[in-house]
């Protein structure tokens, strides 16, 4: 006589088990973010408190505004570069390389050319900044949305179109600036290349709010951006609202680019450096930790870069020149490595 026995049901069978590889990758992500956070805090502390003069209260206030400007510029460039690389499907492309900075300068020059410096002089710096950012958002979404649609995420086509757009916008901006009077030209210089050391307090607060709002708006898009890593066709097949996500992301990119450019001027290759370093340190394609890592790396790059310019180079060259020099060489290195692969 055989006695039937019942095997206990394993309630944990349906629960996915985390592998050793996944645990190791999660630890690496946490470690990378902690290291970046520690370096960022150290860089900020060194910049704020190193070699204070007798007028410590004035120096602390000045350095506080400089630090806020640098952090906003670095974070904006880093986050916008990650977002644009996801849309383009390539880690080699950034808004600066594709002509966003040149478009911003062109729009600012056209505004001065059409309305005149007297009109802009009567506006508050906050109104001017918001107007420039709004115009860039509209034109950026239209132009670069069309670019992404035409190129079909083809790397070679996007690089060629982006370089042509950048050269076209730069040439048009240069041509428009030659039509300005000397007074209007100085107004363009004040708007487009504001020094971070003397940034207007109200403009600084507005750009900080714009940057914080744009980065906060990235949070609901994180899971959709992770789907875009699979490719446009697969993401659409999984239910991704492709047009809505791309349009929203392009709008956020233009706001971030406008914020950083309004403060420190165009820095074409900063986003390229920040995004690729963040990918290497964080070590994950997931956009949650990747965007946080880009934010931290951007702040580190601008703060340490300004320390290098002020303490080592003794202001022999501006920060944008140093970053574009290093970034240009880094861009060529990445291109050559991709060709070998």
Image (tube, grey):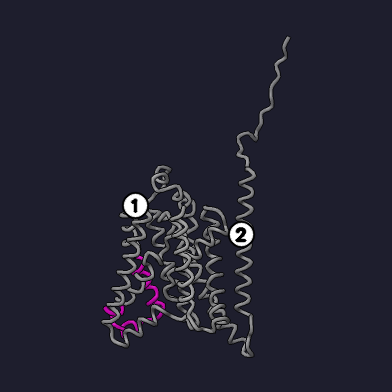
Q: Closer to the camera, 89 or 119?
A: 89
| Farthest-out residue, front | 340
- Residue at the spot x=39%, y=79% of the render? 191
Q: Residue 264, how many percent across, how many down? A: 45, 76
| Farthest-out residue, bottom | 54
Q: CA distance from mark 2 to mark 1?
A: 33 Å
Q: Is residue 127 magenta?
A: yes
Q: Is residue 322 left or right of residue 151?
A: right
Mark 2 is surrounded, within 10 Å at the Cα level, by few (under 14), some (14 to 19) or many (20 or more) other residues, namely: some
| Farthest-out residue, top | 1
Q: Residue 104, how many percent across, how many down? A: 36, 71
* Magenta part of the chain: 111-138
Q: Is residue 226 left or right of residue 122?
A: right
Q: Earlier in the sequence, mark 2 or mark 1?
A: 2
- Characterize the magenta stretch by its predominant secondary structure: helix
Identify the disc placed on residue 32.
2
Q: Is residue 262 magenta?
A: no
Q: How many marks?
A: 2
Q: Residue 220, how many percent across, how many down? A: 48, 55
- Residue at the spot x=36%, y=71% of the render? 102
Q: Which residue is mark 1?
A: 152
Q: Is label 1 in a helix, a strand or a loop?
A: loop
Q: Closer to the camera, 323 or 46?
A: 323
Q: Is residue 117 left or right of residue 24?
A: left
């Amino acid at each position: 006589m055989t006695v039937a026995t019942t095997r206990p049901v394993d309630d944990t069978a349906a629960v996915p088990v985390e592998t050793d590889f996944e645990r190791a990758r999660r630890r690496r992500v946490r470690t990378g973010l902690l290291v970046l956070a520690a370096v960022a805090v150290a860089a900020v502390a060194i910049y704020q408190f190193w070699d204070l003069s007798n007028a410590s209260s004035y120096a602390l206030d000045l350095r506080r505004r400089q630090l806020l400007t640098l952090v906003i510029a670095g974070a904006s460039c880093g986050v916008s570069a990650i977002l644009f690389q996801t849309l383009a499907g390539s880690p080699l492309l950034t808004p600066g390389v594709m002509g966003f900075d040149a478009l911003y300068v062109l729009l600012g020059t056209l505004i001065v050319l059409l309305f005149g410096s007297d009109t802009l002089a009567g506006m508050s710096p906050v109104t001017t900044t918001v107007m420039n950012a709004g115009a860039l958002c509209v034109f950026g979404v239209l132009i670069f949305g069309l670019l992404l649609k035409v190129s079909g995420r083809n790397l070679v086509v996007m690089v060629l179109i982006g370089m042509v757009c950048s050269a076209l916008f730069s040439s048009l901006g240069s041509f428009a600036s030659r039509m300005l009077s000397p007074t209007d030209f100085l107004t363009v210089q004040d708007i487009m290349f504001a020094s971070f050391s003397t940034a207007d307090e109200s403009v600084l607060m507005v750009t900080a709010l714009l940057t914080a709002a744009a980065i906060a708006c990235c949070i609901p898009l994180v899971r959709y951006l992770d789907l875009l890593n699979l490719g446009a066709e697969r993401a659409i097949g999984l239910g991704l609202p492709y047009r809505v996500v791309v349009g929203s992301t392009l709008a956020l990119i233009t706001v971030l680019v406008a914020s950083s450019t309004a403060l420190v001027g165009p820095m074409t290759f900063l986003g390229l450096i920040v995004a690729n370093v963040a990918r290497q340190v964080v070590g994950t394609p997931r956009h949650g930790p990747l965007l946080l890592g880009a934010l931290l790396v951007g702040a580190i790059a601008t703060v340490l870069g300004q320390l290098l310019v002020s303490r080592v180079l003794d202001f022999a060259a501006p920060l944008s020149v140093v970053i574009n020099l290093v970034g240009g060489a880094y861009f060529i290195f990445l291109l050559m490595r991709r060709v070998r692969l």
